[in-house]
Image: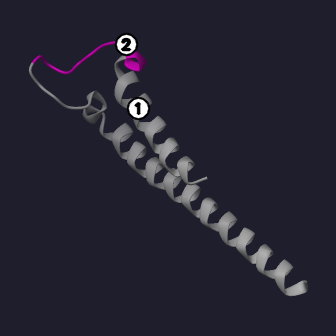
Amino acid sequence: MVALTWIVPVLVFFVTIFGWQYFVGERTVTEGMCYVQYMDEALFNALLQVGYVAICMSVRLSVCRSSVCHIHERCLNRLSD
């Protein structure tokens, strides 16, 4: 479950960084410059950052919640035995 908190953000950024030029159909970064192409798109960049935080927080919270629920269930089972 903890690996999921790493896999989701890596996939989100890997696809956008390496796939952006294919999504828009052209490479617009000038020769000799080194930056991510989607940085030119302010709206997409802002939405990506907000979406990244929302996805990561929801994944992390669900992992923590399931861990706490599992621990709580184990403790209740121990007390009933």
Up-down relation of residue 29 to residue 43 (above or below): above
Up-down relation of residue 62 to residue 14 (above or below): below
Q: Amino acid at mark 1?
A: Phe
User: How many other residues sit within 10 Å of disc 1, few (<14), some (14-19) or many (≥20)?
Assistant: few
Q: Earlier in the sequence, mark 2 or mark 1?
A: 1
Q: Nearer the viewer, residue 76 or 36?
A: 76
Name the disc covering residue 25, or none: 2
Q: Residue at x 58, y 63 (%)?
A: 61
- The residue labelled by disc 1 is 14
Q: Residue at x 52, y 43 (%)?
A: 8
Q: Could you tell whether 31 is left or right of 56 in the image?
A: left
Q: Residue furthest top?
A: 25
Q: Could you tell whether 17 is left or right of 78 in the image?
A: left
Q: Amino acid at mark 2?
A: Gly
Point out residue 60 in the picture as x, y percentages from the top left corner: 55, 59
Point out residue 54 in the picture as x, y percentages from the top left corner: 50, 54
Real-space Cα separation, disc 2 to disc 1, in angstroms: 17 Å
Point out residue 46 in the picture as x, y percentages from the top left corner: 36, 46
Q: Main secondary structure of the magenta part?
A: loop
| Quarter assignment of residue 23 | top left
For mark 2, give the secondary structure: loop
Per the image, is 25 magenta? Answer: yes
